[in-house]
Image (tube, rainbow, N blue to C red):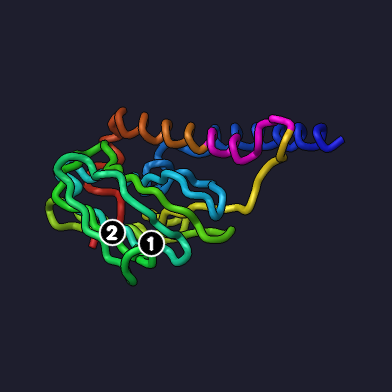
Amino acid sequence: MKAALHAGTVRRTIVLSLLLVLAVPAAALAHARVSPAVSLSGELQLYSLAVPTEKEGATTAKVVLTVPKGFGIDSFVPPPPGWTQSVRSTGSGENAVVQQVTWSGGRTPTGQDSLFEFLAQPASPGTYTFRVQQTYSDGSIVNWTGPESSEAPAPTIEAASSLGGSGGGGTSVLTIIALIVGVLGLAAGAFALAGGGGRRGGGGRPLA
């Protein structure tokens, strides 16, 4: 009985997720994002921050990530060539808590993402909202801090204590959602590679 109920949940999740993929326009996917969008609390795993360069005639030169409370960054993957990293934290040693990370010196061109990776874990279930500041080579700034409906939404992730059934070797709802998030990420990347020059011309995001 439990297996049947779980199977039904998985099927509904797949259908709803596929509908979501079809309903979301490619343009809406081109924003700063932290992946995976859904993960387990208390579990250390690899996360990535991707920030798109949308402004024509300029490159992304600096990215500042402000870490939400309760989201513990353990360590960092070395940044891409040309980028340097500086970390602001409280405490020291094993008790250090990362509050803000700055990557600078890079030159990410229009239509590409600046990508940074780190090992981290959410302390408890809930929504975690990140603040990202993107500086272009011409000095203009985009603050990815708004609500989901805004031009520059803040990246968010959901952390859960558990998702899906346990045991029985079945596919968990968490796995399904992770796969769908991956599809969305690929769609956003494809859109960036395809150009979208007309939409990005003049910089579609609020600039400081």
Q: Is residue 70 left or right of residue 151?
A: right
Q: Which residues are magenta?
A: 168-180
Residue 20 placement (x, y as % from top left)? 57, 38
Please report the residue visible at 30 percent of the width from the left and 29 percent of the height from the top.
Answer: 193
Does 89 sit above or below residue 142?
below
Does 91 sit above or below residue 145?
below
Q: Spot the residue most to the bottom.
A: 91
Q: Main secondary structure of the magenta part?
A: helix
- Contact? badges 1 and 2 (CB < 8 Å): yes
Q: From the image, tell me which residue sits under label 1.
A: 67
Of residue 4 and residue 29, the one placed in the foreground of this image is: 4
Dot 1 or dot 2, earlier in sequence = 1
Please report the residue visible at 32 percent of the width from the left and 64 percent of the height from the top.
Answer: 93
Q: Amino acid at mark 1?
A: Val
Residue 191 placement (x, y as % from top left)? 36, 32
Q: Is residue 152 left or right of residue 20?
A: left
Q: Kindly state the secondary structure of the residue where label 1 is placed.
A: loop
- Tell me, for residue 54, which label it has, or none: none
Q: Quadrant of residue 4?
A: top right
Q: From the image, tell me which residue sits under label 2.
A: 101
* Distance Cα–Cα, label 1 vs label 2: 8 Å
Please report the residue visible at 42 percent of the width from the left and 52 percent of the height from the top.
Answer: 120
Q: Quadrant of residue 23?
A: top right
